[in-house]
Image (cartoon, rainbow, N blue to C red):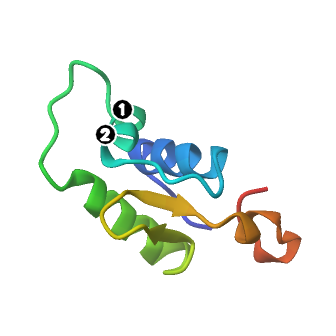
């Protein structure tokens, strides 16, 4: 069993909550951090990297500059162990 940090969990929850939708960096930052918190420039990249390392490299896809998403097919596959 993998233990996720609170920020990793919040980011994953945002992605899984909208499978197939591309979420931009600013949307993921809002989910992972409060309004009054300062964040480093590449913190979302680091969190995504950690999630991919723990859950598998193909779980979270990058849209080539537009944002990140969880593939709907992976969420709807009961044997995948992800999303639901």
Look at 45% across and 73% down and name the residue there.
52
Q: Residue furthest right?
A: 78
Residue drawn at x 54%, y 79% is: 56
**Residue closest to the eye, 78 or 1:** 78
> On the image, numbered disc 2 is attached to which residue?
26
Rendering coords of residue 32 (x, y %): 38, 38
Q: Along the horizontal axis of the image, is 9 left or right of 47?
A: right
Query: CA–CA distance between discs 1 and 2?
Result: 6 Å
Q: On the image, numbered disc 1 is attached to which residue?
A: 30
Image position of 37 with respect to 53: above or below: above
Q: Where residue 66 sits: x, y (%)? A: 36, 58
At numbered mark 1, what does the secondary structure look like: helix, strand or loop?
Answer: helix
Q: Quadrant of the C terminus?
A: bottom right
Q: Residues within 10 Å of mark 1 (few under 14, many from 20)?
A: few
Location of residue 23 with respect to 54 vertically, above or below? above
Residue placed most toward the observer, 27 or 51: 27
**Mark closer to the observer (1, 2):** 2
Q: Residue at x 85, y 77 (%)?
A: 79
Q: Is residue 17 placed above or below 45 in the rendered structure?
A: above
Is 71 on the left or on the right of 81, as rendered?
left
Residue 50's place in the image compared with 28, above or below, is: below
The reply to whether dot 1 and dot 2 touch (C-beta < 8 Å) is yes
Furthest residue to the bottom?
57
Left or right: 63 in relation to 60: left
The foreground one among 72 and 54 is: 72
- What mark, if any, has residue 69 been given in the picture? none
**Image quarter of residue 35:** top left
Which quadrant holds residue 7?
top left
Viewport quadrant of the N terminus: bottom right
Residue 53 at x, y percent in the picture: 43, 76
């Amino acid at each position: 069993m993998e233990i996720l940090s609170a920020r990793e969990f919040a980011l994953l929850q945002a992605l899984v909550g909208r499978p197939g939708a591309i979420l931009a960096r600013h949307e993921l930052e809002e989910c992972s951090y409060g309004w009054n918190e300062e964040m480093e420039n590449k913190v979302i990249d680091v969190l995504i990297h950690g999630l991919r390392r723990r859950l598998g490299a193909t779980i979270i896809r990058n849209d080539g500059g537009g944002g990140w998403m969880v593939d709907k097919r992976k969420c709807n596959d009961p044997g995948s162990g992800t999303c639901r």
